[in-house]
Structure formats: C-alpha cells, structure tokens
Amino acid sequence: MSAESEVMDLSCPLPADHYTRIVTGHGGGGRLMRDLIDQIIRPELRNPILDQQHDSAAIELSSKKLAFTTDSYVIWPLFFPGGDIGSLAVYGTVNDLSMAGASAKYLSLSFILQEGLEMQTLQRILHSIRRAAEQADVCIVTGDTKVIEGGANPGLYINTSGIGEITIDPPLSPFAISTGDAVLLNGDIGRHGTCIMALRENLQFSPEIESDCAPLHRQTEALLRSGCRIHCMRDLTRGGLTSAMVELAQCAQVGIDLQEEAIEVIPPVQSACDLFGLDPLSVANEGRFVAFVHPQDTARALSILEQESPGPVRKIGTVGEKKSHGQVRLLNSYGGQRILDLLSGEQLPRIC
C-alpha cells in the first residue's frame, strides 16, 4: 500500500467532517488517496514490513517449498451473521493454503472501493481484517487501493494473495488419495450459503443461521504434526461437499462412498434449503473441510480434530476402487443410493 508523496503524521486523526464517504478524488495518486491510505488503512494494518512502504514487500522464507494462492471476494451484503467480507477474505486465503498443507505466512490485500461507500463501513471492515489476520497467524505485507464509480448500494471488493511454507513430504495431493482412505469431515454443512441467502431475502430462522466462516489452520496443522498419514484435504466452499467430492474423485480416478446419516445438517439450514429448493450437500461453506486419511490412522485423526474443531467431527465415507472412474455415491441406511454430480449451473448467487 504505497504512495509516492511524503509520509504524513499518523498521529493526527482526520477531522470529523473530512471523510464520511469515499469520493471520486480518492481514485488518483493525490492527497485524498494518500490520506485514505495513511490515516485510515495503514494504521489499522501496520506492521514492520508494511511500514517500509516499498512497492514490493521484502519477506524471508526458510522453506524451499512454497504454496501460493489468490482469490477475490465480491459478497453482498458486506456483513453477515458470523463474519463479513474482511474476515472472509483473510480466512478464505489462509484456508486455501492450509488445504495444501502449508503454513500461511504473508498476505497481500487489495481494495476496490465504490464511490459513496461510507468511511465507517471501511473502518469496520479494516478492524475485522486485522482481527482475522491475528487469529490466523498471518501478516499482511502489501496491497493496493482503487476507487471506482459507485452503484445503488456502494460497496467494496477485496483481492487477496497468500504465501505459505510447506514442510511436509510428500505434499498433499488429490493424486495421493488411495483405496480404503477414510473421508473425515470437521462439522455440519451448509451454514454459509443459507446464511447469506436468508439475509438477502430478509428471512429469519430460529435459531439464527450463522456462517461457519473461520480459519482452519490450527486443525490442519494439528493433523499434520500428529504423524497421521493425511493424503489430501479440500475445503468445501463453492459447490459445497458435492463439488469437492466429485472433483477429487475424478482427479484421483477413484470411487467414493458417502454415508448420508453421517453428514450433519442442522435443522435451520435444512429448513432454509427446503424453502429455497437447495441441496445442502451443494451449499457453500467457509469453515469446513474434508481430509482423506489412511484407514489405520482414522481413529487418531478423529480424536485430534475433535479437540481442535468447534463442530461435530465424523467419518463420512470411504474411498473405493480405482476402477470406479470418479463416481461418488451417497448411501443411506435403507440401502438406497444416489449418484452425486456437479451442478450444471450456479446453485446460488455469489456468496463469497
């Protein structure tokens, strides 16, 4: 988050009437943009690397294996039960690194702000980003800010990129999934997508549906430190459990059998899915993941996850033979089965 003009005194707060909304003049390289960065954004996110104010961050990494990921967040509304666009951006990027078996170290953070956005809204999101970065043990080291023409409901968009260190060998991979692997899930599903849909439609459920937006690094790192043979992990974001299972099964060319009764959907989420005509297995999550574990390590991995996870941890399935060609079956206790497949279109509007 650099600018070319002189460094301003960060100890001098902005006058109360100086900023109430983002205005067009913030979009250039002049004083308004400098004030926005130096007096609103940088004080909230400052750290020794960001304070160097270079166009690029100079960082140190000891590992020879790095994971790198990027994502953009366009969710509306900006705030929702259980989180907001700021915490979602941090956790989403950290979680993508965690799924690769990497420990997140550094993030970039870029804002695209719409003209007319209230400054109080931006400050609230910055507070959330700072708290989320602290909780996720990651450092924001560089970024950018742009202002674009506003709309009927001025908002903001966030792009993040993350770098993490991989210390495990061999690395996690869909190609490492093996016949007999247990499929473990760290909680109930469908919260995030139904939370956003209920908020957009002004519907209330009892109890309130709260997003599962959360960092996953402590759970994944505990698994990897334990010595359990973890072959692959995948977070259940867009497309939910179904998309993750089908994509992994097709990539590894294995069959996967899931037990319907082992997959928990809380009553308010199920009610929302019934109302919206959604399949909870295909609804997005932001704090859930599956781990493919060697069968002999299943009990130990479950015990570790139970200590680290807020939700119910369960074995929900088993990997079958390679000859199954990527088929995923949902089995129930009555002997019935359903073949799971990718949706032909988007089940939900953008929820991240």
Image: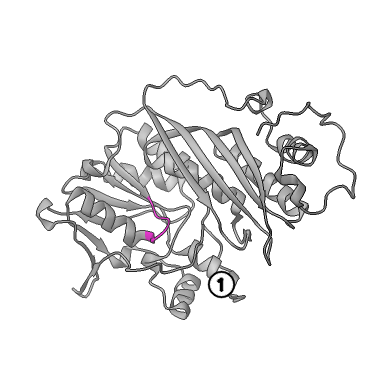
Question: Which coloring applies here?
Answer: one colour
Position above or below: 28 against 117: above
Name the residue beneath numbered marker 1.
198
Crowding at mark 1 (Cα within 10 Å: few <14, some 14-19, many 20+): many
Q: Residue at x 63, y 58 (%)?
A: 78
* Residue 57 x/y as whole percent: 57, 26
Give 6 or 331, whichever is nearer the viewer: 6
Position above or below: 223 against 342: above
Asked if residue 30 can be seen in this view, the reply is yes
Determine if the magenta segment contains residue 239.
yes
Extreme residue toward the bottom, this view: 275
Asked if residue 207 can be seen in this view, the reply is no
* Residue 102 x/y as whole percent: 41, 34
Residue range in magenta is: 235-240
* Residue 158 x/y as whole percent: 58, 48
Label 1 residue SS:
helix
Q: Residue at x 47, y 42 (%)?
A: 70
**Left or right: 334, with 349 as reference point:** left
Which amino acid, by three-letter code, is at mark 1?
Ala
* Residue 42 x/y as whole percent: 71, 35
Tally of numbered tags:
1
Q: Residue at x 25, y 50 (%)?
A: 182
Determine if the magenta segment contains residue 139.
no
Res. 227 image quadrant? top left
Res. 114 image quadrant? bottom right
Give 136 or 165, whichever is nearer the viewer: 165
- Label the magenta part by its dominant secondary structure: loop
- Looking at the rendered image, the quarter that the N terminus falls into is top right
**Left or right: 322, with 285 as reference point:** left
**Left or right: 59, with 302 as reference point:** right
